[in-house]
Amino acid sequence: MSDQTVSADPTNPQASLRTVTQVMRGQDYAAAERLLGWALDFNPEHGGLLRRMSEVRAEQGDEAGALTWAEEAISADGRDAETHAHMATVLARHGRFAEAEAALEQAAEIRPESAIFLRRLADLRLLLGKTAEAVAAARRAVEVRPDDIGGYHTLAALQQRFGEFESAAATLQEAIEREPRNPAALRRMSDFALSRGDVEAAELWAARAIGAAPEDPLGYNHEATVALARGRYPAAEASLRRAMELSPANTTFARRLGDTLMRRGDWAGALTGAEQMVSETPDDPQAHVHLGGLLAARGDRGGARAAFERAIPLVRRPADAAPVMRRLSGLAQQRGDMADAMLWAERAIAANPREAENQNHLAGLHLAAGDLATAHAAATRALDLAPATPGYLRRLSDIAARRGDLAAALDLAGQAIAMHPGDAGNHGHHAALLVRHGQEAAAEAPLARAIEVAPLDAGLIARLSDLKMRLGKRDEAFDLAQRAIAARPHEFTGYTQLANLHLATDDLPAAEAALRRALDALPPSAALFRRISEVLMRRGDEDGAVSWAERIVAEFPSDPAGPGHLGGLHLAAGRLDEAAAAMRRAVDLSPTPVAAMGPMQRLSDIATRRGEMGEALRWSRRAVEAAPLEAGAHGHLAGLHLSQGNLAAAEEAISRAIGLAPANAALLRRASEIRLRYGDMDGALSWAERATAANPLDPQGHNNEASVLLALNRIDGAECAARKALALDPDNASFSRRVNYLEAITADRA
């Protein structure tokens, strides 16, 4: 479409604006810019034309130009509310949130009856951490336009964020009372019911939304969301296909259908649909991103990388490439190429330096690499860019915990909860910190609060079940496991937790029954087969265990976990040749070097069992080369050197391991053992104390401390440490013998 074809009289600003709007719908921004320039030649002080030029520059990725044109628009017409609102958008993109707030306040002052400006002001104030002011703006939006459903939704979202669920429900109900057949209001109420765990109510509200607007594809899209929450994949598929019929051009519905097919195990259908979408809309970057996501989930990281890379040059603005670059960074991290992962992370930051998630992603990479100082700096930058994001506080909390600073970690976790008490992840993170540092009883309350916030989160319910069992609350633990199954009957989480509880009570038939129940409810999976195999092995049914392991290999031939598990069974039975063959197959199938680390270490163990120490070292070193940033790789090599009496090499390896994971109790314990072998008793005790401080619930840590104290002839301390180890693992015969020995020494001394 040429400029002449769509051009209007350039002396008429309104006609020019209508024409430019038409051109922008076709994403021909260069033509839009030429038309606006022509119109501005005749109307150089027209605020609407200047503002539209700013919008065009923003769409082209020229943020500096967008800001300049927005400033000119305000200079030309300082009483135009829309121009001030646009300026707020531009300033926010530059990270100048306080100035953006002032611009929106100006817009709302010029047009006080506008609920839209007030709703935007509420969102911006929330971003700035001004929670009370955000709620006030949302309430004001409802007051000035009680007929605007969006105001109620903004207010309800804030109430839900702050855990005021009854207030949120009342606000949404008021919106529906004003417009009983408004489909958006009905869908929002359905969403709320689903978030509160009331699936039946969610289904009823979703049905009402469709009844109110049967030709609205969004109603069927939402109906699919509710169906997916219950694992009703055929129903979700039918709803999404109906949405696609009503809106064939909306590729979002097609992508969701692909994700649904993947979740039900129909990989062929999901990939065929994604490839067809790429073929039909080759210039749509999201089509390539969707295909890449499916390929990554399938384990085809090479194909995923190619799809993501194809998407980058197709994005409309450079900043839009940043999320794709983060995906590429994540793929590189999975295959153990941290240099490439860092490179893509830096590219994402360069593409959009004001997007906080880019900095958070970089922080995660540095955290994985053990560079806590750089991780902290990146996470701090993320929080500076988006001060009201609790996830970034959790990231900083994780870093503090890795440094061993529990007080700082808990303080940051508390800040995250205060910022967003309606986020279950905040409460779950708080509980995880407490458990990690031996405060299990204290962790019970935050986990229960997390489930109150997210009643259908099977993972959280299973975590509380596990915690209850560890606290001796057996009946509650079993009830929670059943609740996890009821919450997500289409997920493996609840079934495996129930099996774990039965295993903990040595009820092996019940554990097997729980897993066979999952077998009836879920699509076949390698994880499920492996779990059944493990239980059968515990029951002494080696033939059955091997049979299920062989099924994994046969039915999931590209999954390295199959031969890895089969090799473990052969190793346990002493069939070293068969074990080695299976582990080599697992190495060959591993999609990334990091994934190959485990099978390589098992091959090292097999060589050790054979007395082939050179071969054992070769495989352990290969594991380090495959996963140089995995502390466990260096820890395994340290243990191997220690077993051969090579203390210097062992110390060098354990130092690298601890550098990557300074709060890992097993590694700290290994360092203590090395110093003990050197005869450095003070050093051994120092490392032993660090190990027990890092994980007070590790019985081996207390047992190691007892060994060091015994070597120092500090009998009372050794007995105390040994008793702690036995209390944590009362069935451990070795611990029991040590306690008896120390008691006898104490008695002789008396």
Image (cartoon, rainbow, N blue to C red):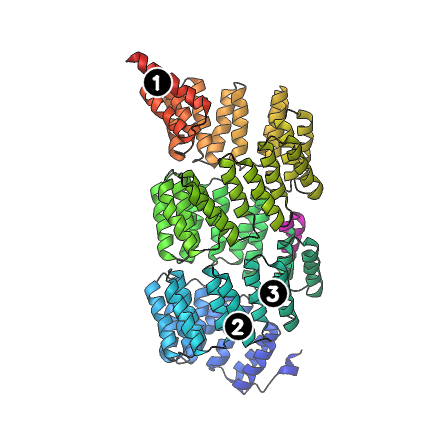
Instruction: Give the residue number, with chain letter if any, for mark 3.
Output: 252
In magenta segment, residue 431: no
297 magenta-colored: yes
Q: Nearer the viewer, residue 138 or 530?
A: 530
**For the residue carrying disc 1, how many other residues have a C-alpha within 10 Å: few (<14), some (14-19), or many (20+)?**
some
Dot 2 alpha-carbon crowd within 10 angstroms: few under 14, some 14 to 19, many 20 or more? many
Residue 347 spot, x, y in % from top left: 55, 53
Marks 3,1: beta carbons within 8 A: no
Q: Is label 3 or label 2 in front? A: 2
Which x, y percent locates residue 226? 54, 62
Please tell me the numbered disc located at residue 743: 1
> How far is mark 3 from mark 1, CA to CA?
70 Å
**Along the line of sight, which residue is nearer the eye, 613 or 162?**
162
The magenta segment is 296-311
Provide residue 272's location: percent of width, then percent of height.
71, 58
Q: Earlier in the sequence, mark 2 or mark 1?
A: 2
